[in-house]
């Protein structure tokens, strides 16, 4: 049964030029929105920009224009990028929208009337670039603990949202709603924070004298509300004036929605807020308690994804290593970038961006696996059956295996996307890509074509391959909308792939015999590593090897060379395993397990690892040790505890395990290889 699906991204600071991190969150929301539309849901996909605050005011002043004019110009960077990245947001909220400002003011007034807001004297250390107050103890050597820059002591009256009274209720909510904050290790972090600290009240105002570019507080004209309070409310205010009013043309539903929308109720609560790990606390704590005070249900899920770095380092203008999504789309195409971002790293974990890894995925997965499958299938139908899909003959074991695999994919994808496991969904879809390629090699249609007695068999094979491609199109459409639409059209399918209903189209055998197909250019052009500038990356050698082996396979016309010994891997295979040095920060035994220890390991970021080394090491012996960690392993749960990686160890001469470590001192997070 179809329902409604409301998904959001953070609203991005309008002062920043969008980079790969912003693209990442927005594409994630787009994949979910597209997928849910295919399932027949009414979808509301919201993104936008955060436009108030001191930084915007200052930047506008420097340009000699008004803050609104400055925001109008900057916002274009985002809307243009979303177009390029094939983002299908239903609305774009700007916190300077009049309707948003009015909603924020209405809510402030309501909370003030209800005694949820209080005016108090306030003193704190303020970091202007981060627009955040810190307490004395937060400061690191007198500077901002977040960005390291100078802070100033500010004393003034301000308005406070009485957040502290919701601490117990929030903890209880998180405990009884385990699906609320995901991934699980992030929920544990939030719970850890709430258990170890007494929640304070939240300062939500700034005096107009110091900051005029904000939403005026309706009950005190000398103040504006502070960025987070204004920004977080975007998710709610958008349901009042930006949410779609009509879905798929069902008159009854439309009437119902128009009614509900006028009260902002149809879309509330959001099904999924996607945010980066940097703003988890503001959402999990500030936003959740604000909603409690507003008597509104909490979002169904708040997912905090990981961080993209470049060669293990934070992207920053000063380092000159900011990855421009515009440039990536121009060089490699939107679909390839979308695929890479969600295949390469499990959503929730940090990832390391490199052009060679991106080009490797394009050449291996897209050009070799999927692209070759499509061009082989279409070429053969054109060549052997005059471009017309034949009627299949009787189905044998190979066909029923292929069909069973193809029909199993939608459920797997549904389950994976329900948990935002994008890379698992792609891995599952790739099982069909691999099986279809193997099917072609096993059935060798080019041999069948030579023997007139095999006409019916060849019909069956060509039909089965074309039908597999049709089903791949459907399952991959949310991830790579442009190339899948292209393939859909080449397969002789009419209309927009984005308009189909997944359930109606997911059965094997829907492709009509007699459909005329076309060949076309390669779906995913290969990246020539020699002529491409791989300057963000340092593992171009591995990718070059990958490129050579890809080209060889592609040149060998149809089936590849099977002579490779089974236990040999290429350097490109090896390059898929990310190994880093890790420093053990904390270790403890796990109740009821003799073998396992729970560790906090610094691999450039702190991750939790469950390691089977308790029989060989006591927790105290491990502290401060530098070990080697597999950092891109999909997380797994052991004794209910999520493990985000694996330590390398060998059997020692004492019969126990001995951990691999470094010969000389090395910083945590150094790449092994
Ligand atoms: O925080 N890797 O806006 P913002 C992955 N206006 N994702 C990244 C990233 C990276 N290196 N860098 C940024 C704000 N992001 C507030 C939000 S919401 C009510 C207000 C993504 O422009 C990620 O989604 O700093 C992160 O949470 C967001 O951009 C921060 O965007």
Image (cartoon, rainbow, N blue to C red):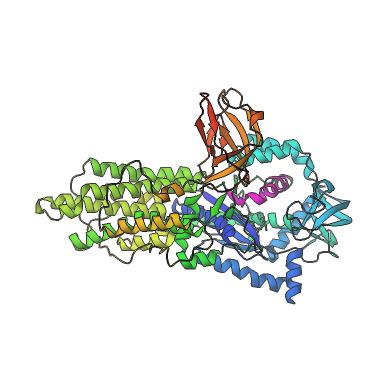
Who's the residue at 62% across and 58% down the image? 315
Residue that protrudes farthest toward the bottom in the picture = 64
Residue 146 locus on image (x, y percent): 73, 52
Where is ligand 1, by quadrant?
Answer: bottom right
- Residue 389 in the magenta stretch? The answer is no
Magenta stretch bounds = 271-292
Image-based side of 244 in relation to 147, left or right:
left
Residue 157 locus on image (x, y percent): 88, 55
Query: Which image quadrant for residue 105?
Result: bottom right
Residue 528 visible in rendering: yes
Residue 356 locus on image (x, y percent): 47, 58
Image-based side of 161 in relation to 181, left or right:
right
Q: Main secondary structure of the magenta part?
A: helix
The residue lying toward the viewer, choosing from 139 and 263, is 139
Image-based side of 391 in relation to 568, left or right:
left
Residue 572 locus on image (x, y percent): 42, 51
- Residue 290 in the magenta stretch? The answer is yes
The residue lying toward the viewer, choosing from 301 and 616, is 616
């Amino acid at each position: 049964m179809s329902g409604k699906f409301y998904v959001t991204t953070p609203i991005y600071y309008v002062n920043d030029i969008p980079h790969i991190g912003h693209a990442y969150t927005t594409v994630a929301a787009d994949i979910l929105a597209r997928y849910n539309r295919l399932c027949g849901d009414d979808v509301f996909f919201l993104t936008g920009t955060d436009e108030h605050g001191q930084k915007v005011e200052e930047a506008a002043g420097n340009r000699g224009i008004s803050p609104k004019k400055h925001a109008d110009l900057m916002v274009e960077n985002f809307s243009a990028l979303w177009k390029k990245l094939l983002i299908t947001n239903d609305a774009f909220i700007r916190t300077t929208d009049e309707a948003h400002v009015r909603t924020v003011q209405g809510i402030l007034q309501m909370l003030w009337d209800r005694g949820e807001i209080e005016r108090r004297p306030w003193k704190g250390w303020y970091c202007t670039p981060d627009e955040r107050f810190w307490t004395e103890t937060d400061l690191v050597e007198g500077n901002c603990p977040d960005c390291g820059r100078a802070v100033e002591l500010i004393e003034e009256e301000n308005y406070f949202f009485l957040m502290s009274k919701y601490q117990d209720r929030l903890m209880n909510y998180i405990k009884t709603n385990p699906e609320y904050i995901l991934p699980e290790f992030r929920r544990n972090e939030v719970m850890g924070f709430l258990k170890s600290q007494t929640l304070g009240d939240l300062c939500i105002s700034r005096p107009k004298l110091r900051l005029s570019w904000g939403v005026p507080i309706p009950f005190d004209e000398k103040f504006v509300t502070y960025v987070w309070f204004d920004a977080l409310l975007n998710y709610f205010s958008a349901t009042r004036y930006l949410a779609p009013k009509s879905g798929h043309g069902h008159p009854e539903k439309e009437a119902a929605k128009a009614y509900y929308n006028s009260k902002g109720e149809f879309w509330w609560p959001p099904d999924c807020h996607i945010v980066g790990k940097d703003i988890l606390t503001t959402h999990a704590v500030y936003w959740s308690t604000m909603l409690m005070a507003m008597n509104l249900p909490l979002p169904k899920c708040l997912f905090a994804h990981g961080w993209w770095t470049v060669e293990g380092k934070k992207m920053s203008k000063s380092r000159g290593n900011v990855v421009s999504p515009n440039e990536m789309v121009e060089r490699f195409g939107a679909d390839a970038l979308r695929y890479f971002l969600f295949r390469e790293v499990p959503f929730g974990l940090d990832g390391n961006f490199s052009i060679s890894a991106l080009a490797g995925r394009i050449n291996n997965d897209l050009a070799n696996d999927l692209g070759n499958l499509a061009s082989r299938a279409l070429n053969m139908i054109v060549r052997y059956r005059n471009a017309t899909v034949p009627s299949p003959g009787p189905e044998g074991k190979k066909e029923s295996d292929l069909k069973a695999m193809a029909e199993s994919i939608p459920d797997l994808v549904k389950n994976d996307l329900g948990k935002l496991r994008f890379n698992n969904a792609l891995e599952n879809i790739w099982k069909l890509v691999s099986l279809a390629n193997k099917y072609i090699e096993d059935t060798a249609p080019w041999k069948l074509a030579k023997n007139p007695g095999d006409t019916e068999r060849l019909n069956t094979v060509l039909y089965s391959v074309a039908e597999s491609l049709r089903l791949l199109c459907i399952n991959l459409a949310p991830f790579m909308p442009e190339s899948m639409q292209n393939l859909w059209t080449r397969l002789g399918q009419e209309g927009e792939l984005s308009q189909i209903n997944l359930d109606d189209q997911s059965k094997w055998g829907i492709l009509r015999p007699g459909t005329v197909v076309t060949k076309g250019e390669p779906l995913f052009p290969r990246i020539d590593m020699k002529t491409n500038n791989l300057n963000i990356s340092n593992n171009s050698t591995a990718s070059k090897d990958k490129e050579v082996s890809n080209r060889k396979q592609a040149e060998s016309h149809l089936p590849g060379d099977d002579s490779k010994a089974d236990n040999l891997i290429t350097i490109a295979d090896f390059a898929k395993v990310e190994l880093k040095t890790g420093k053990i920060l904390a270790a403890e035994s796990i109740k009821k397990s003799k073998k396992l220890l729970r560790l906090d390991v610094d691999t450039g970021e702190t991750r939790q690892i469950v390691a089977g080394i308790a029989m060989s090491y006591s927790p105290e012996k491990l502290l401060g040790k530098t070990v080697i960690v597999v950092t891109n392993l999909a997380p797994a749960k052991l004794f209910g505890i999520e493990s985000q990686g694996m330590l390398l160890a060998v059997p020692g001469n004492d019969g126990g395990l001995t951990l691999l470590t470094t010969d000389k001192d090395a910083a945590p997070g150094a790449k092994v290889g």
